[in-house]
């Protein structure tokens, strides 16, 4: 008699998150400009591997008191199976004629549900 044990069944517990990074520059309590990026993603709770990421990601740039913000690039970038970056670039102009600032935001998130912003700036203001 030949006996065998059935292969073990792996149960995957997917966890779903939405992460948003937001950076704002104020002068005297009034918004000059801001930038944000967000995406939903899922990861395996047992292996901490990221299984899916929203594509395309969401990004927004806006200005106040005459400043206009415009997203020029947005993307999700895979670091490895357990970490991704959400990246967005923006241009800001004053009354669409005068002045020009660049904006950039990066939000790193992991398969453990953690996230943080890095390499984020608008003009000379850095996070």
Image (cartoon, rainbow, N blue to C red):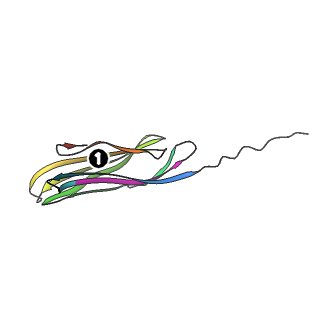
Most extreme residue toward the left is 98
Q: Secondary structure at mark 1?
A: strand
Q: Is residue 37 magenta?
A: yes
Q: Is residue 98 magenta?
A: no
At x 46% / y 53%, what residue is drawn?
17
- Tell which of 50 and 109 is nearer to you: 109
For the N terminus, the quadrant is: top right
Q: Position of residue 34 (x, y in %)?
A: 23, 54
Compared across the picture, whether 101 is left or right of 14 comes to left
From the image, give the main secondary structure of the stretch colored magenta. strand
Q: Which residue is mark 1?
A: 105
Category of crowding for the residue at label 1, using alpha-carbon neighbours closer than 10 angstroms: few (below 14), some (14–19), many (at least 20): many
Q: Tell me if 83 is positioned left or right of 71 in this view.
A: right
| Residue 19 pos. (x, y %) | 40, 52
Q: Which range is magenta?
A: 34-45
Residue 115 in percent (x, y) is at 40, 45
Residue drawn at x 47%, y 47% as measured from the top left:
113
| Res 18 quadrant in image | bottom left
Q: Position of residue 122 (x, y in %)?
A: 20, 47
Seen at 19% across and 54% down, the residue is 33
58 w.r.t. 102: above or below:
below
Residue sitting nearer the eye, 29 or 83: 29
Name the residue located 28 percent from the left edge and 51 percent from the top edge: 73
Counting the numbered discs, the total is 1
């Amino acid at each position: 008699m030949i006996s065998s044990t059935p292969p073990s069944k792996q149960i995957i517990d997917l966890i779903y998150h939405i992460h948003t990074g937001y950076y704002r520059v104020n002068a005297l309590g009034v918004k000059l400009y801001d930038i944000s990026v967000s995406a939903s993603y899922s990861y395996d709770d047992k292996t901490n591997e990221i299984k899916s990421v929203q594509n395309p990601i969401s990004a927004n740039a806006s200005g106040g008191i005459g400043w206009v913000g415009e997203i020029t690039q947005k993307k999700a970038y895979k670091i490895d199976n357990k970490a991704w970056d959400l990246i967005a670039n923006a241009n800001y102009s004053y009354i669409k004629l005068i002045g020009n600032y660049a904006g950039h935001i990066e939000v790193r998130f992991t398969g453990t549900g953690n996230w943080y912003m890095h390499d984020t700036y608008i003009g000379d203001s850095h996070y």
